[in-house]
Image (spheres, grey):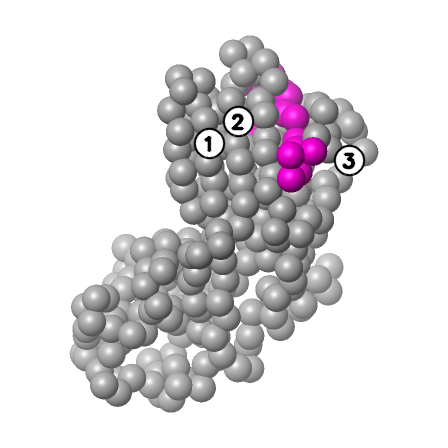
């Protein structure tokens, strides 16, 4: 099956994205996601991440074209020459994080995150969180608005807004970044091996409730959260060779 006959176009709900979907489907044909080998996502970064989650583990490659606002993860939108662009694209395989959260009611919730697993305070009081890495306590008590573990793919998202480090896509690292740390005031986080398992234990969970989220999967009133890189799940993104993700991440570090 040729590339032209194996594309599934999907779009967000914006008018620009829907118009692009209609135009491209008429020009190149439309396959179902189950039949296609390439999924072209039309929208913004959030929609691309949702498409990656929907196709996780299927072996399908996702090529995003920007019909959103920022489009950091997206290729430039052009209607012409799409099959040639896809054929020349560079593939980047990423591994999501696995979150295992335990709630105050004893429920266990698991979810995958391409960008980050984040915890944040649920009330007006600061959260108090103990942090362990590979079963060793590294921070007995962090008083903060929140804390997160970010992948290289997610390091330019919420992590960067919280003044965390930008990680090259092929770096075998995870960023552990606090959000508005109060005590210890000068702690700015840590770089961890992508093989590390991180556990967050909520101190005083009834007085200082904490929520957790793996990307958009939110869990309320958690008592503990364990995070590690998935050993099995993968997602593959396609980028135009003159505008690779690694190049974008490098360029982002020289913005001012």
SS class, disc 2: strand
Q: Which residues are magenta?
A: 120-136
Q: What separation in Å lies between label 2 and label 3 (alpha carbons)?
A: 21 Å
Q: Secondary structure at mark 1?
A: strand
For mark 1, does the 10 Å Cα neighbourhood hold few (<14), some (14 to 19), or many (20 or more) residues?
A: many
In percent of width and height, residue 206 lies at 52, 12
Q: Nearer the viewer, mark 1 or mark 3?
A: 1
Reply above or below: 82 against 171: below
Dot 1 and dot 3 residues touching (CB under 8 Å): no
User: Which of the 4 image quarters holds residue 249?
Assistant: bottom right
On screen, residue 213 versus residue 28, left or right, reads: right
203 or 127: nearer the eye? 203
Residue 22 place in picture, x, y as percent: 21, 71
Q: CA distance from mark 2 to mark 1?
A: 6 Å
In terms of secondary structure, where does tag 3 sit? Answer: loop
Residue 27 vertical position relative to residue 219 in the rendered view, above or below = below
Q: Position of residue 55 (x, y in %)?
A: 33, 60
- Mark number, residue 216: none
Quadrant showing the C terminus? bottom right
Q: Residues within 10 Å of mark 3 (few under 14, many from 20)?
A: few
Q: Which residue is under mark 1?
A: 101
| Marking on residue 224 | 2
Q: Nearer the viewer, residue 120 or 61?
A: 61
- Residue 47, compared with residue 189, is above or below; it is below
Say the numbered circle drawn on residue 187.
3
């Amino acid at each position: 099956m040729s590339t032209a006959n194996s594309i599934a176009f999907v779009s967000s709900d914006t008018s620009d994205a829907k118009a692009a979907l209609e135009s491209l489907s008429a020009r190149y044909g439309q396959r179902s996601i189950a039949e296609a080998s390439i999924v072209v996502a039309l929208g913004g970064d959030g929609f691309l991440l949702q498409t990656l989650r929907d196709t996780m583990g299927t072996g399908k490659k996702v090529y995003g074209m920007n019909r959103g606002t920022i489009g950091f993860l997206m290729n430039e939108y052009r209607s012409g020459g799409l099959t040639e662009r896809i054929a020349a694209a560079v593939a980047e395989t990423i591994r999501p994080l696995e979150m295992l959260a335990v709630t105050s009611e004893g429920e266990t919730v698991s979810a995958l995150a391409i960008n980050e697993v984040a915890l944040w305070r649920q009330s007006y009081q600061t959260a108090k969180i103990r942090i362990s890495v590979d079963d060793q306590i590294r921070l007995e008590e962090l008083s903060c608005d929140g804390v997160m573990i970010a992948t290289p793919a997610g390091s330019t998202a919420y992590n960067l807004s919280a003044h965390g480090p930008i990680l090259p896509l092929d770096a075998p690292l995870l960023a552990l970044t606090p959000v508005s740390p109060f005590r210890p005031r000068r702690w700015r986080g840590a770089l961890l091996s992508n093989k590390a398992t991180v556990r967050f234990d909520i101190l005083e969970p009834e007085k200082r409730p904490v929520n957790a989220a793996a990307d958009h999967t939110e869990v309320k009133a958690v008592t503990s959260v364990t995070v590690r890189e998935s050993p099995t799940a993968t997602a593959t993104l396609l980028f135009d060779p003159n505008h690779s993700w690694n190049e974008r991440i490098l360029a982002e570090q020289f913005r001012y």
